Image: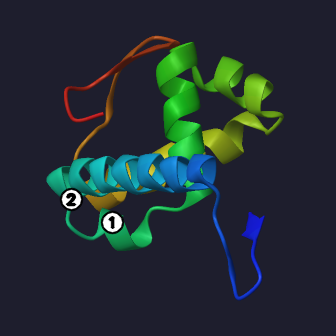
Amino acid sequence: IHHGRDASGPTEAGQAYGRRVRRALGRLDTALAGLAPRLVLTATRAQLTALIAVRDAENFTLAAQRLGLSQPTVHRAVTQLESEAGRPLFHRMGKRMQPARAA
């Protein structure tokens, strides 16, 4: 933050960061709206974090361990998103999870 005589505001680096955040949030809103319009309003940070962790780990248990959460908590978060989307976000193959096209 730059502090000037009359006002303070973001530095040039802060402005660049702000643009990146707005762009990322816009993409996220577009993706969520494509799944189900309500997700833009209802998806929580915890649910999205769980979704990304499961996608990366391909497994609820490993995702939970990486997040420092219980497996049921991560499973519940993803299940709530799937319920809101009205479709599965992962193909379940035993313990392995593959993202559905929508995820």
Return the x and y of residue 52 as percentages of the image width and height. Answer: 51, 32
Q: Looking at numbered disc 1 in the image, what kind of residue is underneath it?
A: Val
Farthest-out residue, left: 34
The quarter holding residue 66 reads top right
When the figure is inspected, residue 30 is found, relative to residue 101, above or below; the finding is below
Return the x and y of residue 75 as percentages of the image width and height. Answer: 58, 40
Q: Which residue appears at 69% of the width and 46% of the height? A: 73
**Residue 37 versus residue 74: which sits nearer the camera?**
37
Return the x and y of residue 44 as percentages of the image width and height. Answer: 53, 62
Q: Which residue appears at 45% of the width and 62% of the height? A: 43
Farthest-out residue, front: 5
**Residue 17 versus residue 80: which sits nearer the camera?**
17
Return the x and y of residue 28 as percentages of the image width and height. Answer: 34, 50
Q: Which residue appears at 69% of the width and 18% of the height? A: 62
SS for dot 1: helix
Q: Which residue appears at 52% of the width and 18% of the height? A: 56
**Residue 95 versus residue 14: which sits nearer the camera?**
14
Split into 4 quadrants, where in the image is the N terminus?
Answer: bottom right
The answer, for residue 86, to whether it is visible in the render is no
Q: Which mark is residue 33?
A: 2
The answer, for residue 49, to whether it is visible in the render is yes
Q: Are marks 1 and 2 in contact (CB under 8 Å)?
A: yes
Which residue is the site of mark 1?
A: 40
Q: Is residue 32 left or right of residue 63?
A: left
